[in-house]
Image (spheres, rainbow, N blue to C red):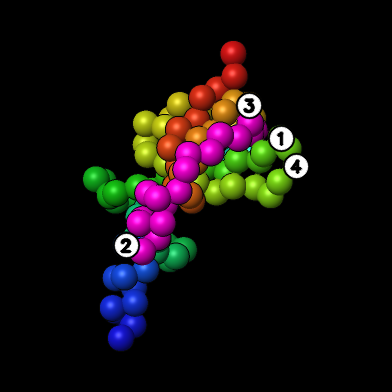
Amino acid sequence: MLATRQFIKPRREAVVNHASPVRMLTVKVKTKREYPSPNRRSRQREAIAGEEMRYEAWFHPLNGASDIKAIVGERDYNEVDTGAKGELKMQGSSFVSFTPAQ
């Protein structure tokens, strides 16, 4: 039962995100981090060569709304600088793009 729920939940969320309109927000990049995909919490953990990494960025909307956490790809992660201001595009709860202000 639990496995079925774990399987269906991400698919349902993807359908909702796909049906949502793209919204644009003026934001400031608050912070970003990368971590191994199977997030092991061992204190003795060493980096494993070739291990898949996950990338996330936190954005603070300039209109005073609450912070937004977005899972981003490696390329987007490397292009985003902490403290940069720009335009964030989100579709539902999924990240579309971030364009820094000129």
Instruction: Out of 36 and 29, give the one closest to the viewer.
Output: 29
Magenta-highlighted residues:
12-28
Q: Nearer the viewer, mark 1 or mark 2?
A: 2
Instruction: Out of 13 and 30, give the one closest to the viewer.
Output: 13
Residue type, label 4: Gly
The residue that disc 4 covers is: 64
The residue that disc 3 covers is: 85
> Residue 80, position in %: x, y?
50, 29
The residue that disc 1 covers is: 62
> Residue 87, position in %: x, y?
57, 28
- How far apart are the two marked residues, 1 and 2, measured between alpha carbons? 31 Å
Residue type, label 3: Lys
Asked which secondary structure carries label 1, the reply is: loop
The tag earlier along the polypeptide, 4 or 3, is 4
> Residue 66, position in %: x, y?
69, 49
Q: What's the mark number on residue 28?
A: none
- How far apart are the two marked residues, 4 and 3, measured between alpha carbons? 14 Å
Callouts 2 and 4 close, C-beta under 8 Å = no
